[in-house]
Each structure stands twice: as structure tokens, then as C-alpha cells.
Amino acid sequence: MKTPELPPFDHKPKKYTGLSPDEILRLRKEYLNPGIFLYYKKPLTMVEGKMQYVWDESGRRYLDALGGIVTVSVGHCHPKLVEAANRQNELLQHSTTIYLQPKIVEYAKELASKMPGDLKVCYFVNSGSEANDLALLMARAFTGNYDVIALRNAYHGGNAATMGLTAHRTWKFNVPHSFGVHHALAPDPYRGPWGRDDVDAGKKYAGDVKQLLDFATSGQVAAFIAESIQGVGGCVVFPDGYLKHAYEHIRGAGGLCIADEVQAGFGRTGTHYWGFETQGVIPDIVTMAKGIGNGCPLGAVVTTPKIATALSQRIHFNTFGGNPVVCAQGKAVLEVIEEEKLQENALKIGNRILTGLNELKQKHDLIGDVRGKGLMLGIELVKDRRTKEPAKEECAQVVETAKDMGLLLGKGGLWGQTIRFSPPMCINEQDADFLLGVLDLALQKA
Ligand SMILES: Cc1ncc(COP(=O)(O)O)c(C=O)c1O
């Protein structure tokens, strides 16, 4: 089978004259945090990006089907975003909330207009970890309760508070961090006790939240937090009704419901603007990062005016939160999603890829499960479909082979056994076919 070719694209990368990959690697080893990891045995040096593509130092183009880890929502260096950020950079780069500033309020108004119900008070921070940390504080201050229920297989960040919410041993240091946090069963229809053939699966998984309330807490909790689709955990889509039942249990115990939309928000699921809407619920607090800024350090927490009053008991301040440059870029992201109909595109192209992935499942026994919504998709690789033994090495190999053929993919799951697809939402049909063609070959090789 011939290696598929990338669709034509009208952009000539600049000639790269910077440090060589070997030199970057040497300096990285000498001067950067040793806890970071590289995706590939033969690392990729990324020097330029335009829309759904990136280029390496030699001028070779790749389709970025991971979107900078689900962050490049509307396209690398999208011209409208570059223009908005440049314009603001030349005018005023920094102010803080001690002064009046137009960009932050213009942006907050636009962001709030995307939210359902009474969710309209915005807090701006710099990352997803900070957003979740703040959401926890808010829920505890508002309810007067301390305990929190999160889900196994979740990723909510790596700072002190959110490492406690995260539930993969790989991201948790051996220090005290999970005080007051209880982890319920991951509502994973592939690996969990109730599968997709069980119409009551959502209710049954939510029953574990109730069990925790009854057996692990005082019966009163501050919050429940869940991603709307588990991203780092390997694109785990919850059974219908799960969040509805879990929220009922939590609200019955005096708690608030927090939706972590860091990966699933901003139209990525295709059918809805927010991931939680696919489950028919309205949370009390929504946290956002990654795709909200298309790559700039922007995070947000949106809640109701009533809950926000809890944080007015003390001063709340964040030096860079709501910085005029990132607010200008964040506002441009919202506009581009609308103007270019990117949510609709996520649905159309996502469905095309999903159909292709299901066809590949018929052909390759390595694929144990195909799942996802819109442009948040995953395939879980297993050595044996019956035992579901995670195919970690095979997954790494497929991802490496795909890169060598010009396709960047993601990995997820505790064992790194799930291939993740979360490209910028501007991806087109030819890109989707290229992706499927490369994947077919890479799976064949594995
Ligand atoms: C669902 C989710 N929440 C929170 C975070 C933490 O975001 P950040 O890395 O910006 O702190 C991540 C990061 O991957 C995430 O996937």
C-alpha cells in the first residue's frame, strides 16, 4: 500500500535557521525540568504552524491531529487571532483588574453569552490547573463543606490541589495531596462493569457516587467534578444519563457540580458547544483552558452570581488573569468558531473519522474500542479483545510510525494504550482521509 500524501496546502514555511535538533535536545537535558517527556523515540522539532499543520526544522509538513494536546482549537497561528493579539500587544500588554480595562469585560460578556442558565460570572486565570483549583475553593467557600468527589481515570491538573483530583498514579507524586477527595468509579463502558448494551449503565455508574456519599463522607460535600469526556484518561465517553444522576446525588448532599471543559468545550464535541450539554445537564461551575485560547495562557471559571458571592468574602486577585492580550485572543477564538462554523465542521469531519475508525476496527484486531464525539475521538488498543490487555508498546509504535508518515497523534489512558484524535477544528475531509490512510498502514506495521 502506498503511503498517503498530505492534501495540498498553500503555505510556504520560513527557512529555519535556529538551533539544530541535537543542540535543542542537549540544552533541554541540561537546563529543563527532567520530569518532562518526549513523545517519540526520534523526537520531532516543531518550528512553525499554520491552521491544522505544523512544520519541522527541515520544512517537512505534518497534520497535527492532536492539536497541541487538544489546545489548538481553531488552527495554528490563525490570522484573525494573530491580528487581534498583535494589535493588543502594540497597545497595552498588561493592566490587572485594579484598573478599568475594556478587553476583559468585552471578552467576559462574549464568553458568558455562550453559557446556559445563570452561568455568567467569569474569573480569568492562566491554566486549567488554576481554574480547577479556584473552582474547588469556590465550592468549599460557598457550601461550607470540604469533601469532593472526583472520578477515577480523571485528569484535572498537576498543581497541589488538582493533583488530588487527578486519578492516575502516573501524575500523582508520593506526597499528601488528596485530603477530602474521594474517587468514584470511572463511568467507562468499555472497561467498567456496565457496557454500552446496558441502557441503565449511566444510572448504575452514578450509583457509585451515592455509595461514596453514604460510606466515605459525612453525607455533606462541597462538590463533584468531572470532565465531560475524559481526555487524558483516553477519550472515555460516559453512558447517557450519567451526569444527570450523579448531579442529583451530589445536589442532594449539598454539593455543587463542576464541569471541567478544558478539553471538551468550545464546540469540539460537534453536537454541542459544551461537553456537559451532551449529557443534558447544567453545572454550577464550569472550568475552561486549552482550546479557550488556541494556545495562549488563558483559563477561566464561570459560575452563577450567587455562587460568586462566596468568593467576595475575601480579596480574589490573579496578576495575569484577564490580561488584555489573552482576552483579545480569547474573544477572537469565540468569533472564529462562529464565523467559520467550526462546531459544525467538528461534527462533520469527526463523523467521517469515526466511521473510518470503525471500519479499521473490522480490519485490525489490535483495536479494542472506538469512541468519542465530534473531534474528540479515541481508539483503545488491546493485545487481546477478550482479556483487553492494554497494548501499550503497540500504541507507542503506531504513534511513532504515523509521525514518520506525517501525522501527529495523541496517546491517553493509564497505560498509554489509547490513540487520541483531537485536531484543530478547521481540519477538512482530505485531512480526515489522509489520517485514516496513515493509521491503517501504521496499524498494519504494528
Ligand atoms: C481536563 C483537563 N483539566 C485540566 C487540565 C490542566 O490544565 P493545565 O495543563 O492548563 O494546567 C488538563 C490538562 O491536560 C485537562 O486535560
Image: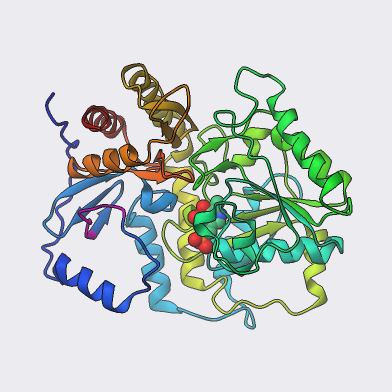
Towards the viewer: 5 or 414: 414
The magenta segment is 39-47
Q: Position of residue 116 (x, y in %)?
A: 70, 44
Q: How many marks?
A: 0
Q: Which secondary structure dominates the residues rendered in magenta?
A: loop
Tell me if residue 105 can be seen: no
On-image quarter of the N terminus: top left
Q: Position of residue 192 (x, y in %)?
A: 61, 31
Tell me if residue 41 can be seen: yes
Residue at figure coordinates x 63%, y 78% from the top left:
97
Q: Position of residue 237 (x, y in %)?
A: 56, 34
In this view, 243 is above or below 75: above
Residue at figure coordinates x 64%, y 61% from the top left:
164
In this view, 376 is above or below 44: above
Q: Position of residue 292 (x, y in %)?
A: 51, 55
Residue at figure coordinates x 31%, y 31% from the top left:
432
In this view, 386 is above or below 426: above
**Colouring:** rainbow
Towards the viewer: 247 or 203: 203
Left or right position of 113 against 443: right
